Amino acid sequence: MTTSPRVSSSTVRVRYAETDKMGVVYYANYLVWFEVGRTDWLRETDWSYRAMEDEGHVLPVIEAHCAYRQSARYDDELDVRTTASAVSAVRVRFDYDIVRRADGAAIASGHTVHATIDRQGRPVRMPARVRDLFA
C-alpha cells in the first residue's frame, strides 16, 4: 500500500516591501516563502524547529532551487504547498509549489535539501520517529 505525501498549505499575502520598483515580487522572497512552508510543514507534524533544536538537531539548507513561472505582485494571496521526503539517513528534501489563489496560476516551484547536523555541526541521523514523517 502506498501513501500520498503529507502536504502542508501556507497562505502568504505579498507585502509592498517584497516588491521591486516594477511592482513585481523580488526573487529572493520566494526562498523566504519556502521557509514559511517548511516551518508550517514541520509544525503540523508536531516537530517544530524549536523542538528540533532543543533535541540537538539542526537542518541547514545545503541546496536551494527555484523556478519562476509567473510574476507575483503586491497584495496577491499565494498558497505555498509543501511536501517532504527523506533523501538519506542524514538529508531531507522539501518541495514547494507557489500558486496564486485568485486564478490558480502556478507562480513558482522549487526545492531545498537539508543536512541533519548536531550542535557541533557534525552530520547525524534523524531520530526514527522523525524519519517516519518523511516516508
Image: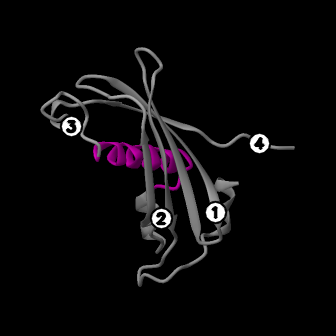
Q: Amino acid at mark 4?
A: Thr
Q: Are marks 1 and 4 in contact (CB under 8 Å)?
A: no
45 part of magenta stretch: yes
Residues shaded magenta:
28-48
Q: Are marks 3 and 1 in contact (CB under 8 Å)?
A: no
Secondary element at image label 4: loop
Q: Amino acid at mark 1?
A: Val
Outermost residue to the left = 21
> How many residues crowd mark 2 within 10 Å: few (<14), some (14–19), many (20+)?
some
Residue shown at the point (59%, 72%) measured from the top left: 90
Outermost residue to the top = 103
Percent coordinates x, y for residue 87 in the rendering? 63, 63
Secondary element at image label 3: helix
Percent coordinates x, y for residue 68 in the rendering? 40, 38
Q: Are marks 3 and 2 in contact (CB under 8 Å)?
A: no
Q: Amino acid at mark 2?
A: Met
Secondary element at image label 1: strand
Residue shown at the point (36%, 42%) measured from the top left: 33
Q: Nearer the viewer, mark 3 or mark 2?
A: 3
Distance of mark 3 from mark 4, alpha carbons? 37 Å
Q: Earlier in the sequence, mark 1 or mark 4?
A: 4
Numbered mark located on residue 3 in the image: 4
Numbered mark located on residue 52 in the image: 2
Distance of mark 3 from mark 1, alpha carbons? 32 Å
Q: Earlier in the sequence, mark 2 or mark 1?
A: 2
**Residue that carries the numbered disc 1 in the rendered image:** 87
Numbered mark located on residue 18 in the image: 3
Distance of mark 2 from mark 1, alpha carbons? 18 Å
Left or right of 119 on screen, residue 91: right
Percent coordinates x, y for residue 112 in the rendering? 48, 55
> How many residues crowd mark 3 within 10 Å: few (<14), some (14–19), many (20+)?
some
Q: Amino acid at mark 3?
A: Glu
